[in-house]
Image (spheres, rainbow, N blue to C red):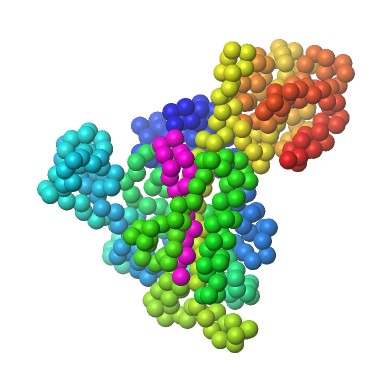
Amino acid sequence: MDKISSLCKRRGFIFQSSEIYGGLANTWDYGPLGSELKRNVKNLWWRSVVQERMDMVGLDCAILMHPQVWKASGHVDSFTDPLVDCKECKNRFRADHLTSTDDPDIKLCSSCKSKIDLRLSAPRMFNLMMKTSVGAVEDAGSITYLRPETAQGIFVNFLNILDTTRKKLPFGVAQIGKAFRNEITPGNSTFRTREFEQMEIEYFVKPDEDEKWYKSWIEERFNWYLKYGIKKENLRIRPHQKDELAHYAKACSDIEYNFPFGWSELEGIANRGDFDLRQHEQFSGKEMLYFDSQENKKIRPHIIEPSGGVDRATLAFLIDAYHEEKVKDETRVVLKFSKELAPIKVAILPLLKNRPQLVGMAKDIAEGLMGEFPICYDDTAAIGKLYRRQDEVGTLYCVTVDVQSLEDQKVTVRDRDTMLQDRVEVSRLKEYLSDKLKSE
C-alpha cells in the first residue's frame, strides 16, 4: 500500500483532502488522473448494467430525503456501531477493530496499544448517519440526514418508475451517487471513508424467482471485475453466515478482493426479500405493489441488491494494475490498466524540446488527436524519462516525434506492455490508434 499511495500522490491519482491545512482524516481528493480513472469505472459500470440491458433503467436521487425514509428503513433505530474510547490517547475505535488478548475482557488500543478493560469501558452504540438541518431555523423539526446509502431513493421511487417506464418483472434500477457514514475508519487509503460513492442496483423479481436471480447477479458482478482487468486469483465470493446477515436479508454474498491489507469486501449482493417495499408501504400509507397481468393479481416484488463502492473498485483496479519489472537492470513501474480503464490512452512526446520544428509538429499531432482519445502532451524531460512517466500512469501508447519525422512524416508508436515500437505515417496515425484501442 505504501508504494501505491506514493505513486497516487506523485502522479496525481489521489491527494489527501485539505492537505495544506493538515488534512482531514480519511478524506481524499481525486487528482487529474484519478478523476479520469474513477469516471471510467463509473461509465463502464453504467454501460454494463444499464445501457447494455433491456431490463434496467437509471435513476439519480437527491442526497437529502424526508427523515421518515430513514425511520422506515431502520437506519434511525439500528444503523449503529459499537465504539470504545481509549482513556490514554483519547481516540475512539470500533470494538471489533481492537486487538484481542488472552483475556476476553481486555483489548489493546489500535493506536497507542494501551490496555482497555471492557468491563470499565463498555462499548457504546453510535448511530452512523450524519445529521444536518434544512431551513433557516435549526430545531428538532429541521433535522434530516445525509443519506448513508443510495438504495432508499430507489425504493421510494418504485411507484414512479412503474408509472413512467411500464417495466415488467423482472426489472432493475441502477444508481451511482454519494453516501455518507460517520463511522470510525481504519485507514487503508480510500477503502473506507466517511464520504464515498456507491454503484447500486435494486432488481425487482417475482417472489418465487428470487433465488435464481440472486445467483445470477453474483455471477454477473463477479465476471464484470474480471472483464476489466482484475486477476481471478485476487477475487473470491464469500457467502454470509446466518449470524452476520443484516436484519432485512434472506441471503448475502460478498465479492472480496485480496487487498495488500487482506481480503476485504469489494461488492455485496443481497437478497433483501420484500422488506423495503413493505416498510415504506407501512410508513407512507402508499400501496407498494406490482400488478401481475399474467396472474391477474397484485404482488409485492422481492429485491436483489448488487451494491458496490466506486472508490473501492477504483482502488482495486489501481492495485491490480501495479507491476514492477526489470528492464536493462532497472526497475520499470507500470500500471497495466485495461484499455477501457486507462486514464490516458495516448501520449505525444517530442524527442527534443529545444527544436521548435519538432515541438510544433508534436503539438499539431496532439491537437489532431484531441477529442478522439484521452491524450496528453509532454516535453519536460528526456525521452527515456518521459516513457517511464507514462508507464507509471498506465498510458497505453506513446507517440514520439523525432528528427526523422520532419523528413518522412512518420512517428514512432511505443506499446506500453510490450515496449515494441512501430513506425507509423502521421496521415494514418488516428486510424492506427483506433484499431489498436478497439482490438482485444
Residue 224 counted in the magenta span: no
Describe residue 365's horizontal placement relative to residue 191 as left or right: right
Q: Quadrant of the N terminus?
A: top left
Q: Nearer the viewer, residue 291 or 381?
A: 291
Residue depicted at x 62% and y 26%: 391
The image shows residue 337 at horizontal and vertical percentages of: 62, 36
Q: Quadrant of the C terminus?
A: top right
Q: Is residue 348 above or below residue 29?
A: above
Q: Nearer the viewer, residue 268 or 309?
A: 268
Residue depicted at x 65% and y 21%: 387
The image shows residue 139 at horizontal and vertical percentages of: 28, 63
Q: Is residue 47 above or below residue 425?
A: below
Q: Main secondary structure of the magenta part?
A: strand
Q: Is residue 93 above or below residue 357?
A: below
Residue depicted at x 49% and y 58%: 269
Describe residue 140's horizontal placement relative to residue 226 as left or right: left
